[in-house]
Amino acid sequence: MSEIKAAKGTRDIFPPEIQKWQFLENAIHDYYKKFLYQEIRTPIFEHSELFSRGIGSETEVVQKEMYTFSDKSDRSLTLRPENTASVVRAAIENNLFETVAPLRFYYIGPMFRYDKPQKGRYRQFHQFGIEVFADDSPQVDAEVIFAAVDFLNKLRIADIRLELNSVGCPRCRPLYLEVLRKAARAEGGRLCADFRRKIEGNPLRIFDCKLPECAETTRDFPLLDGHLCAECRDHFAAVRETLSWMNVPFQLNPRLVRGLDYYTKTAFEVTSGQLGAQNALLGGGRYNNLIKELGGPDMAGIGFAAGMERIILHLENPALPKIKNLFVAYGEQKWLAHAIQLAEVLRAEGYPVYLDFQGKNLKKQFKKADKIAAAFTLILAEDEIASKSVSIKNMASQEQKKIPLKDLNERLKKNY
Ligand code: AMP
């Protein structure tokens, strides 16, 4: 039979790399709880409309990258390409705005995009992220950004760079977009076909194009920073000031527009100098219209999403406490019941215990004990059973001693 391989753009995660994932997940739980974020878990698939309305029908993600399918009742469903729209949907549907305080959520989980796979870019990838609702203050923008950068610093991720921009609001952005359209129409012939199409829809996307011709053409295009309204300008100035109080270094990038349509005011991205082409570690920003757009109250929101695969690429294998495995060996099949019961008691005490059901004889079981790197092997044979004792063998020193069963826990605790 031919071998079945994992689907393109997906990957298996197994030891020893899985240790990094568990370490990262634990770090996320510990860190974000310090800011009173609470975990939220939303479904992997949603009605497709959530993403076309929430992310924006003009975006790359919605136009090209969604895993959309019809279920047996002909509903259009989509594997979530990101989690913010789902968190907002869940908050509206479950009225979390009234029942949860503060309105701060974090999530961890797989996302799906039909992207071109390469190192650091997958079709099933993982993000963690945070969302804050109902707080429009620029200081919370700075705190969210701090909580992104400081977390990466705590993980000792070197060579990171924070870029910051304001993408305006529904009051100032449309006026600017007209100015930009004008410039883009004049140079249309020099932009790639993809971006010529975007001039009328969302011309901000023009700044996303990585093609050198487009970058060159747009170099002198008018930028949004000169067209912000007074409110957006003041908000952005306060974000920058608060970041300076927090000692968070940043670089202004007036071309930073982010891939998703729902951002207003603050937008930011953290990149790594060590990741090559896929250098974005996380991105986020404020989305003051999304909640209303998805049928909820007129309420502000801000958050970010971080790519876990890319963070994992930077992580050293964490120094985990050495786990001392125990191995319970039994001299003959007839002592198996005793061995099973001893393993049960030891696990209840908190020890990791392995019992080899294929062990034909003690010699073979000892070999297995070596293979699983057991620290101690506990042996039950005729003698031990008769005297209610157990022989304990230190696998490193090969020393072996018979002790009363009742003293075993005490003894292990001392040596553990
Ligand atoms: P976005 O939701 O597009 O703002 O992405 C946020 C972060 O998710 C990025 O900075 C990346 O670190 C990560 N990311 C996005 N797309 C992918 C992908 N296809 N594979 C791996 N990581 C990704």
Image (cartoon, rainbow, N blue to C red):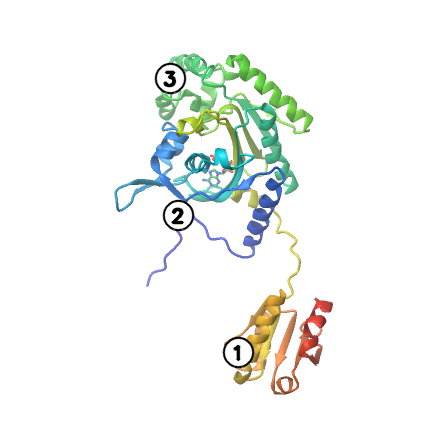
Q: Which type of secondary structure does the marked residue at label 3 adopt?
A: helix
Residue at 57% from the left image edge and 79% from the top image edge: 338
Give x and y (percent) for residue 138: 58, 23
Residue 139 falls left or right of residue 413: left
**Residue flagged by tag 1: what amino acid is it?**
Gly
Residue 326 falls left or right of residue 305: right
Q: Which type of secondary structure does the marked residue at label 1 adopt?
A: loop
How far apart are the two marked residues, 3 and 1, measured between alpha carbons? 74 Å
Q: Which residue is mark 1?
A: 359
Residue 76 or 40: which is nearer the viewer? Answer: 40
Check if mark 3's residue and mark 2's residue have beta carbons within 8 Å: no
- Pick the quarter of the image with the N terminus: bottom left
Query: Dot 1, crowdedness within 10 Å: few (<14), some or many (≥20)?
Result: some
Q: Earlier in the sequence, mark 3 or mark 1?
A: 3
Query: Dot 3, crowdedness within 10 Å: few (<14), some or many (≥20)?
Result: some
Q: Which residue is mark 3?
A: 188
Of tags 2 and 1, the one toward the viewer is 1
Residue 286 sits above or below residue 382 on the image:
above
Q: Earlier in the sequence, mark 3 or mark 2?
A: 2
Give x and y (percent) for residue 205: 43, 24
Farthest residue, direction right: 414
Residue at 58% from the left image edge and 20% from the top image edge: 236
